[in-house]
Amino acid sequence: MARDWRDLFVTGDDGAAADADAGSEERRRGLFSRLRENMAKTRQALGAELHSSVFQTLDEEAWERLEETLIYADVGAATTARIVERLETEAEAGELAGGEQLTRRLTELLADAARAGQDHIDLRERPTVILMVGVNGTGKTTTIGKIAWHLQKEFGRSVLLAAGDTFCAAAVEQLEAWGERAGSDVIRAAEGSDPGAVAFDAISAARARGHDVVIIDTAGRLHTQEHLMEELAKVRRVIERQLPGAPHETLLTIDATTGQNGLRQALLFREAVDVTGIVLTKLDGTAKGGIALAIAQELGVPVKLIGIGEALDDLRPFDPHDFARALLET
């Protein structure tokens, strides 16, 4: 599973992928430490229950409290029921005791639940087209900028950004600022222009100029706005006609603080544009980080990136095991 940017992106550069710098393990430990720190709200909500004395004895009351705690953290009712049932069965068979052993086994089961589908992003097509979608305020444009920065600075990829949010001048300005920071050109159009035309022009420009990756921004929209969802589907069709097989990746940004509403958003966005991966943002601001598991289990769509703060390194590839550890380890 993806733990670092080199694990997330499939580039075809085998030598570069194998070339882990000497400080990579230390860096990864540092990243886990920061993840754990920024997941404090969810961990505290879970840990207060998990490390209480009641879990030294695995009785009916303990299982009920565990179930309530996981549901409160937005792990989801169905996923919670499966996990608790598995733990109960193992405890009854004498395979599981309370305390640290319970925490360790729960970590394993949460990590398994967080895995879904293909968790990589394949960059071997030239150009690779990434379509970004999501509700207003989920951090979509910032996510685009950070991905572009990492692709350019760490992989030497030439990235072209498309300002497909033609209704919000501030979004275009924000994208242009990120483009300057990441060394990426930006294709934009007049305010109110057809976003499909912007996507078409960006792919044409990328093919003509030899760009490696095109990342297409789109206007934020509520999943309940049917006409805007249809517009999004139209943008996707334009991309497909312009470059067969594209978009190669469609990433949906979800604000983790919205909890189960984020899951409902994902369901409708998936119907409109065939979402291939989730970017779960603002995990540092919620006690309901379990939504990552609910998304993976109920949608079958992998969480590929998580946002745990404002810094560049606070957007990072999602690692289910590290995520589960950060939720539970005291």
Image (spheres, helix red, strand yellow):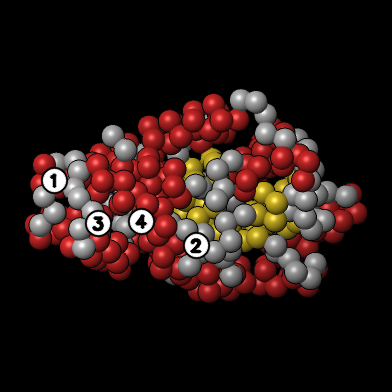
Which mark lies nearer to you, 3 or 4?
Answer: 3
Q: Residue at x 77, y 55 (%)?
A: 124
Q: Amino acid type of disc 4?
A: Leu
Q: Residue at x 54, y 26 (%)?
A: 26
Determine crowd level at label 4: few under 14, some 14-19, many 20+ residues with C-alpha closer than 10 A: some
In percent of width and height, residue 261 lies at 36, 61
Q: Secondary structure at mark 3?
A: loop
Q: Which numbered disc flags the more N-terminal residue, 1 or 4?
A: 1
Q: Which numbered disc flags the more N-terminal residue, 3 or 4?
A: 3
Q: Quadrant of residue 148?
A: top right
Which mark lies nearer to you, 4 or 2?
Answer: 4
Q: Amino acid type of disc 1?
A: Gln
Q: Which mark is residue 95?
A: 3
| Marks 3 and 4 in Cβ contact (< 8 Å) | no
Q: Which numbered disc flags the more N-terminal residue, 2 or 1?
A: 1
Q: CA distance from mark 4 to mark 2?
A: 13 Å
Q: CA distance from mark 2 to mark 1?
A: 32 Å
Q: Is residue 163 visible?
A: no
Q: Which residue is mark 4?
A: 109
In percent of width and height, residue 69 lies at 21, 53
